[in-house]
Amino acid sequence: MNVDVLVIGGGMAGATAAGKAADSGREVAVVRRGYGATALSSGAIDIALDPVRISDDSWSDSSPVKKDLKELIRRNPHHPYRTIAFGGADPAERIVGIIREALDKLVKGFKDRNLLFTGSLDSNQVLTNNLGTYKFAAFSQGTISPGDLLKMRQARLLFIGIQGLSCFNPRYLADSLLGFSRRQDADNVQVTDFILLDFPGYLRSSNILPAELAAGLDNQEMAKKLTESVKRAVGDQDYTHLVLPPVCGLERSFQTLEGIQDGIGRPCFETLSAPVSIPGLRLQRAIDAYLTGKGIKVLDGEVVSFKESGGRIDEVILNDEKSISAKSFVLATGKYIGGGVVKDHEFKEPVFDLPLFFNGERIREIFIKELVGNSPAASHPAFSVGLRTDSLLRPLQEEGEVIYENLFAAGAVLGGYNYLTEKCGLGVALATGFVAGKNAGEL
Ligand SMILES: Cc1cc2nc3c(=O)[nH]c(=O)nc-3n(C[C@H](O)[C@H](O)[C@H](O)COP(=O)(O)OP(=O)(O)OC[C@H]3O[C@@H](n4cnc5c(N)ncnc54)[C@H](O)[C@@H]3O)c2cc1C
């Protein structure tokens, strides 16, 4: 097979790169071995949050995004945002422009899939999740964004649990959110309460998996039954919003939520989700549909080796021994979850054996304890390990030379940023995917 641009990886970075290259009239294919971190993401698109400025407790500290972006770029010389904004007068403004354009294209393509993202590049939303905490994010799926706690005043929230669905414990979530809310100056949330629904549309009342419930709710009859159950259980309780588990459907979540909302006459929203994340799966499926909708070939397979000549990649070879040649390649293989970076004694980029960096230094063998914190919530510098590139996003050698003229990299395979503490995971995937796709398409 021969194409103009081959993108390796089908997450947010790969899809954005492929879409942008296809827009410049190139024949584009995506090869991916499966789903990566994008399919696990919580339902939000993070752009930037300054971990130094933000205090743990205050929701009103959450904005503005652009100011925080500026700070990430200023403080971190290896941040991919800074790399691609290189040389511009106002780097933060340039990144905002790139993300706006990238998101606009992608989200327009998502419309048919009932997956609208709502938010802004001016300020973060504050969104609760199904772990009992909350998170700042610039954008969230349309079924989640009505739950922006910053926009609420004296809200009375009713959490709806479903008997047998263990990923959403409404009693704990209601209690936990109220605790956080009481630490705020503004009276965002006044009261929380919960009900546990015995949902008759489902036969079992134990061990219900989020994915099977979400798939079930894509059936309109079942969605109607859920609305009826909610109406009955809620009765005339006094509340301003209903908070639902993030399982309202894979394809028709918006309609399901709207049905419940119309049925009870109050706003409803889903929380963000920890893995396994139905909102993450929704995003990945919308990405898949976006790619095929643009006429981009999506191939299932793992790239295991490649051929090069004269400082250029000629072709890659898949695990089934088929080969794909292209004029240019985008490496968007993610990090530890996607498979773009592996740790097997040494840190390794397994496709092209590219050098990996941490804090600008080439990294080879290192005891993992030096890069991870003691608690799950610690900052884990291991997340910052990855490729170093020039401003066109071509991977670099330790000495700074471009390795292959026609190879570009995007997304989590890049080093120099920590998506967890800087809240910029899908933002970096979007911005670098867009730039890598543009450059690959122009070659
Ligand atoms: C649990 C969790 C929750 C998160 N929540 C959020 C959130 O709410 N908001 C946010 O902004 N960010 C979030 N992030 C971060 C965000 O999901 C990632 O930064 C982002 O998805 C990375 O996208 P990517 O396209 O670079 O990589 P991935 O989505 O990991 O995609 C990598 C792709 O490369 C493919 N691949 C890898 N190796 C090969 C190979 N050899 N051959 C072929 N294909 C290959 C994989 O199969 C996959 O398709 C979260 C991350 C995690 C882990």
Image (spheres, grey):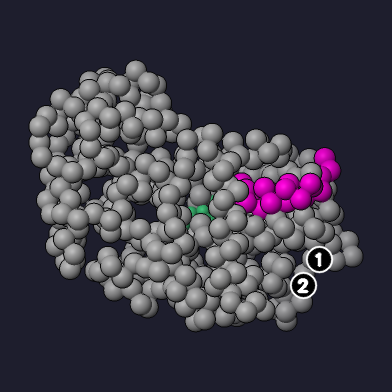
Quadrant of the snapshot with the C terminus: bottom right
Residue 139, given in percent of the width and then of the height, sits at 43, 54
The residue drawn where x is 68% and y is 44% is 31
Q: Where does label 1 land, which residue? A: 405
Horizontally, residue 411 falls left or right of residue 419, namely right
Quadrant of the snapshot with the N terminus: top right
Residue 377, given in percent of the width and then of the height, sits at 33, 65
Task: Report whether residue 429 is seen.
Answer: no
The residue drawn where x is 29% and y is 74% is 55
19 drawn magenta: yes
Residue 294, given in percent of the width and then of the height, sits at 68, 39
Kindly give the residue lying farthest to the right in the view shown.
310
Look at the numbered disc 2 and give the secondary structure of its residue: loop
Three-letter amino acid code of the residue under disc 2: Val
Q: Where does label 2 land, which residue? A: 402
Residue 21, given in percent of the width and then of the height, sits at 73, 51
| Contact check, label 1 and label 2, Cβ < 8 Å | yes
Task: Report whether residue 255 is seen.
Answer: yes
Q: Residues within 10 Å of mark 2 (few under 14, many from 20)?
A: some
Return the residue nearer the eye: 153 or 167: 153
Q: Which residues are magenta?
A: 1-26
The residue drawn where x is 65% and y is 36% is 292
Return the residue nearer the eye: 118 or 363: 118
Horizontally, residue 433 falls left or right of residue 72, namely right
Return the residue nearer the eye: 86 or 175: 86
Three-letter amino acid code of the residue under disc 1: Glu
34 drawn magenta: no
The residue drawn where x is 21% and y is 31% is 264
